[in-house]
Amino acid sequence: MAKSVLHYGNESYNVENATFAIIRGNTHSLDVATVVQGQNVHHSVLSLAWGIVADVDIESERFRGLGELRNDIYSLIRITRLRKYRGTLAYVPAPGYEGSLDHISREDSDLLSSSIPDMNIEKGQQWGGYSGSMSVPEKSEWRIMNGNFILVWLMNVPWATQTVLAAPKAELSDGFLDLLIIKECSRRELLKSFLKLSDGTHVKSKIMDYLKVRAVCLAPGGQVNGGVEGGYISLDGEVLARGAGAYGDGSKDPMCYGSSIYITVEKGLATVFCA
C-alpha cells in the first residue's frame, strides 16, 4: 500500500517519504473491496489471489527470513512444480471491457444465481459495520469462465510488493478492481511473464488476460491431477480459504473451501495519506 500511494504522488518508496506524506496531511480516497463467503464478510484494500500467486505468498512464509528473495525462490519452485486448479470464475467487466467474453448461457446463469450469496438480499443491508450497496449486477452483465486456472488475481492498487507492479492500470479510487487471469500456458511462458512483473509489462503477455471489473464471483476447486484438493485463496496476504489437504488432512480445517466467494468494490470508501 505504501508503495502504491507513494507511486501515485511520484515519490520514491522509502520510510522518509512515507513519513513526510503523513506529516503533510494530504489525503486521497481509496476503494475498498467487500468479500462475502456464506455468512462471512471481509474487507480488502490490496488484493485477492488464487493459484500460483497465493501459493507462493502463503507457502513461502517458511522462508520469511530471506526477505523479498523468498518470493523469487518460491516462485521458481512453483513454476517448476506447476499446479493447475479447477474452478469457475464469473465477473462483471468495467465499461470498455464488455467484449472480453460472451454473455453467459442459461446454464451458467443458473449456476451464477446459486453461487452469489446475496442475490436476494435487499440493497443496503448492514455488512461488516457499514451499509455498503452490495447490489448485484444484472445477469446479462456477467461473463463466466470454467475450466483449469493457473492464476486468478484481483488487485485494488498497482503494486503487490515494492518490486511487483502487478496492475499497472490500477488507480486508488476508480471504483474498479483489476483482474489478471492465466489459464493454460507452458512453464517457460509463465517464467517469462513473471520476469516482467517488476515493470508491469507482464500484462501484455499472450498468456495473460488483464481487465477491469466491477464484481467477481469465484468458485474454487481442487488441483488438476492432484492427490489432494490443496491451494489457497489469499486476501491482503492472509489466508481466506484453502483446499482440503493444504493444512493437515483437511478433515477438521475450518478454513476449507466452502461457499463461492463474491467480491464487489466500493468507490472511495477509505482515505489514505498521500504525497
Image (cartoon, rainbow, N blue to C red):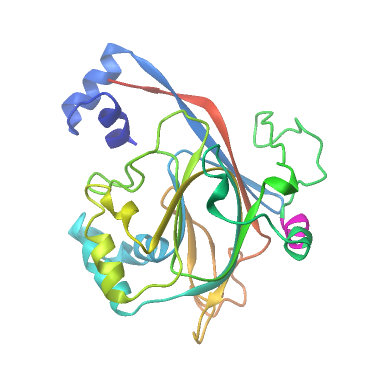
In the displayed structure image, the side of residue 71 where residue 154 appears, left or right: right
User: Could you tell me which quadrant the C terminus lies in?
Assistant: top left
Q: Residue at x 66, y 50 (%)?
A: 142
Residue 81: give x, y in percent of width and height. 33, 80
Residue 247 in sight in this render: no
Location of residue 79 with respect to 201 vertically, above or below: below
Question: What kind of secondary structure does the magenta stretch mostly adopt?
Answer: helix
Q: Is residue 221 magenta?
A: no
Residue 142 in sight in this render: yes
In the displayed structure image, the side of residue 103 where residue 31 appears, left or right: left
Residue 262: give x, y in percent of width and height. 64, 50
Q: Residue at x 26, y 74 (%)?
A: 188
Location of residue 48 with respect to 7 vertically, above or below: below
Part of the protein shown in magenta: 111-115
**Quadrant hosting residue 7:** top left
Q: Residue at x 36, y 45 (%)?
A: 167
User: Could you tell me which quadrant the N terminus lies in?
Assistant: top left
**Quadrant hosting residue 63:** bottom left
Residue 18: give x, y in percent of width and height. 24, 26
In the displayed structure image, the side of residue 69 where residue 94 appears, left or right: right
Which of the two residues, 68 or 206, is positioned nearer the viewer here? 206
In the displayed structure image, the side of residue 3 where residue 32 appears, left or right: right
Q: Residue at x 23, y 55 (%)?
A: 196
Residue 121: give x, y in percent of width and height. 80, 41
- Give the number of callouts: 0
Which of the two residues, 265 or 170, is positioned nearer the viewer here? 170
Location of residue 48 with respect to 51 vertically, above or below: above
Which of the two residues, 208 or 270, is positioned nearer the viewer here? 208
Q: Is residue 113 magenta?
A: yes
